[in-house]
Image: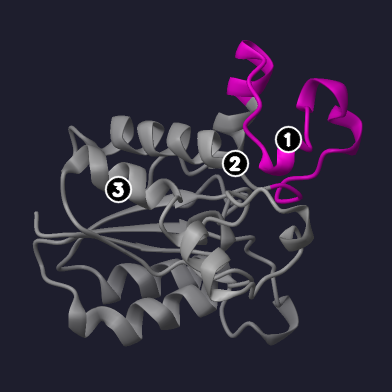
Amino acid sequence: MQKLVAFGDSWTAGHGVETEIEFKEVISPPKFVEKLREQNSWVRWLADTLNVPFVNMGECGFGNEYIFESVKSNLKYINKDDLIIIVFSYPYRYERHNKYTPEELFIKFETLLKDYRRFYFNGFYPFIENENFKFPKHFINPNKTLSYQLQVEEVVNKKNVWEYDSKSVWNDEKNYHEGDYHPNVYGYQLLARYIYKQIKDKM
């Protein structure tokens, strides 16, 4: 494996690792904060575990069609022995402007990446809500989300895993909506461990 390349939205870009509350809703913060996010997301911690360099292509605010275009335009820089991980965003983000259904878009991802080593995860909402869809083995837990993994950690171990120490699932389950909150640094480290555990025997 030469390098790890990750694509996704703010859950890949690392939104939430900063401690300054002023940046909570800021998609395009100052370069310093952008680098802080990028270099402390789950991508960095997973690359450390794999002992490889990484490229974090996550972009705050990206929908899945934007993610697809990012993969497509950057594929020329990616080698066949690199590891690609894509974390899908909310499937209905920018719904009025999307060209494809989630199923159609996923097939486009698979066609584009058929010769590459890749894994897919859901960030905070299932990408495809279709019980009859035939998911490949490299789509990890297609009915679950990375957000769910953090909720379990928080509820079971009473650990704070969310940005700015601003969320407690067990105190606010009624008002919690998937995607409302991002992980903190500890949350991203947990996600890296989870992702590694899911892919280590499949690579």
For the question of whether residue 68 can be seen, the reply is yes
Secondary structure beneath dot 1 equals helix
- The residue at 80%/20% (across/down) is 170
Report the residue marked by disc 2: 184
Image position, residue 146 (x, y; %): 53, 40
Marks 2 and 3, how far apart in space? 26 Å
- The residue at 68%/17% (across/down) is 155
> Dot 2: within a 10 Å radius of its alpha carbon, few (fewer than 14), some, or many (20 or more) residues?
many
> Which segment did they paint magenta?
152-181
Looking at the image, residue 71 lies above or below residue 82: below
Residue type at mark 3? Answer: His
Secondary structure beneath dot 3 equals loop
Report the residue marked by disc 1: 165
Image position, residue 172 (x, y; %): 87, 29
Q: Are marks 2 and 1 in contact (CB under 8 Å)?
A: yes
Instruction: Locate residue 121 relative to residue 176 in the image: left or right.
Output: left
> Dot 1: within a 10 Å radius of its alpha carbon, few (fewer than 14), some, or many (20 or more) residues?
few
Looking at the image, residue 184 lies above or below residue 153: below
> Dot 3: within a 10 Å radius of its alpha carbon, few (fewer than 14), some, or many (20 or more) residues?
some
